Image (cartoon, rainbow, N blue to C red):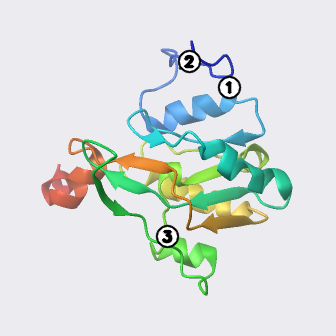
Amino acid sequence: YTKQDSRLRSFRRPDMVPKGHAACRNYGLTLAQGEYVYFFDSDDLLAPEFIATYLPYLEKDPNLDFVNFRFFRFAASPKRIIRTAPAKPPEVPLIEAMAGLQMPVGTQCFLWRKSLLDRVPEKWRPGLFFGEDQEYYFRLLHEARGGIALDEPILFFYRRNRNGLCYRLRHDRRILDD
């Protein structure tokens, strides 16, 4: 995509940066120069109108530090949807809905204002076995001035990876014993 769009850049992890999601995302944050940050995994998909749809919420309201949105989960093809992320019940405060898993809390379910990420000194915590995104996001939400959770439209497609840690933890409890 970097050849198709000059606004996109790709970086390789230097040897001095440890391997792993957390360390690589922290490294990416040191390179980020824009006003907004979106964490995206290489095997997931975004609809072409993703940015044009969600970014205006942050641009129009300087008191919003994030946009949260639902997703479709798919296996081999996004045409075969397995299920959708839950919608936040309107009467439940945002952080309570997230803590009760009544709304999506995954890595790719937020578009962030970079100034919020800059206000929280400790970033992703390397070494966490599972849930590093939720742990970091709860700290961000504690500092956020405000945000919005949208039920529609759903423009992010999360690939269910049978070899991934999340899938294996849900289906093979022996992993926790290793």
Mark 3 secondary-structure assignment = loop
Mark 1 and mark 2 in contact (Cβ < 8 Å)?
yes
Q: Where residue 82 sits in the image (x, y, percent)?
A: 28, 58
Q: Picture quarter containing residue 37?
A: top right
| Sequence-earlier tag: 2 or 3 | 2
Amino acid type of the residue tagged 2 in the rendering: Phe
Question: Outermost residue, top direction?
Answer: 3
Front position in the image: 89 or 121: 89
Residue 112 seen from this side = no
Residue 103 is marked as 3
Q: Is residue 52 above or below residue 131?
A: above
Q: Picture quarter containing residue 123?
A: top right
Q: Where residue 174 sits in the image (x, y, percent)?
A: 13, 55
Residue 11 is marked as 2
Task: Give how far apart the Cα atoms at labels 3 and 1 are.
Answer: 30 Å
Task: Give how far apart the Cα atoms at labels 2 and 1 are.
Answer: 9 Å
